[in-house]
Image (cartoon, rainbow, N blue to C red):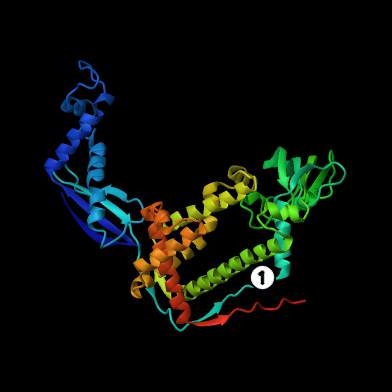
Amino acid sequence: MNYTVTPAEKSTVKIEIAFTPEEWEAANDKAYLQNRKKYTVNGFRKGKAPKSVLEMYYGKGLFYEEALNLLYDEHYGAILEKEKDNFTAVGEPSLSLGDDFSETHVVLIATVPVMPEVTIGQYKGIKINKYEYTVTDADVERDIEATRKRLAKNVDVTDRPAAMEDTVNIDFVGKKDGVAFEGGTAEGYDLVLGSHSFIPGFEEGVVGMSIGETKDIGVTFPEDYQEESLKGRPAVFTVTLHKITGKELPALDEEFVKKLGADSLDAYKEKVRTRLEKNAESRSRNETENAILEAIAKTASAEIPDALIERQEEMDLQRMEQNIMYQGIRPEDYYQYIGTTREEYKKNFEEDAKKMVLHQLIIEKLLKDENITASEEEVSAKIAEQAASVGKEPAEYEKTLDPRQREYIENDIKITKLFDFLIANNDMVLYTEEPKAE
């Protein structure tokens, strides 16, 4: 076996693997031995017919596909390992045969998406926004109120109409021009009012309804709605409300805060403030780093293979599905309600996926170009910091880390150092939000 590698379009390489007649014959013999029990020939017990007889009955190429798969499995991974310093595969290859395929000349062609090269025009001396967020007393009060709501008890409501933040159990039938449309009907559906899981106007229309009441709610589907026949069109939902479930908030007292690990109300508020300040610091850093990448990306270019974009799209979609599942909504129900499929909805993430992949490529290139590394001392210090956060000794904690976790720690250190470098080498201007018009 020998192979050649040549660059192809849109960040792919073409690997042409040529096999000798002896290798091809051996692969066919192996394919025959592994698959002969699938075939029956009169005069032979099942699985006992010679290879030549099976080829005569079923065709000369009976075992070709399986033989090619065997050769691919045997050699493709080894080639990638041998070429790892020259390119990195980022997706599954597209396979084909050479045009002059014969029993004595077999060439398997693998067109492989690879990590692309990125070109960066400028990454120093750019005027870039720097974000800083502070924590106010009102922020602390809002967070405490959110915790009370999260720990509230569910209670059946019978003495008032439905209100925002209630969970209502409803039947509904949606009609356009007086005719019920597909996906617009449900029975016994639990809906959290204010969750914005339905189209604008629907949840607001349920507010104020009483148990046992039936009401027609007029809505207009958004212009960007997935289902073409419903885009921008008015519709009427006939809604019947069966049950209202509200929240009973715990009292904000010493007993409440002790359950949350604080000795007093003041100590709890200080604990909340510390956590919010840490979050604000993280948000400030994240948005500043994103602003830096956005600025550098304006001068950067790369031929990004579809495989990388599709992988990022899938990650983004899975994250969205997890979020709606936390709200008690099944993804398949959500897609049906908005009149689309999972694959169609995934296209909404395409532009963000392209941007995210380009940003990742920029980071990797700058780490290499600026020779930014993580020393053993820096990695050990980070591990010690993490160990302290969970009350363990560094040596004990390090034993629990697998190689991927250690690699993640090393990469995190390098990326932090990279952004420290970029902040120091660009014109960082404190971002001030434009005042809103009265």
Reply above or below: 270 against 218.
below
Residue 37 x %, y %: 26, 24
The C terminus - image quarter:
bottom right
Reply above or below: 71 against 372.
above
- Residue shown at 49% from the left, 60% from the top: 388
Q: Is residue 184 left or right of residue 64?
A: right
Q: Is residue 304 left or right of residue 263?
A: left
Name the amino acid type tagged 1: Val
Reply above or below: 408 against 58.
below
Q: Which residue is mark 1?
A: 135
- Residue shown at 43% from the left, 81% from the top: 124
Q: In front: 115, or 180?
A: 115
- Residue 235 in sight from this viewpoint: yes
Q: Is residue 202 left or right of residue 261?
A: right
- Residue 307 in sight from this viewpoint: no
Q: Is residue 191 left or right of residue 125?
A: right
Query: Where on the picture, by quarter, is residue 368?
Result: bottom left
Q: In front: 172, or 103?
A: 172
Residue 417 x %, y %: 43, 72
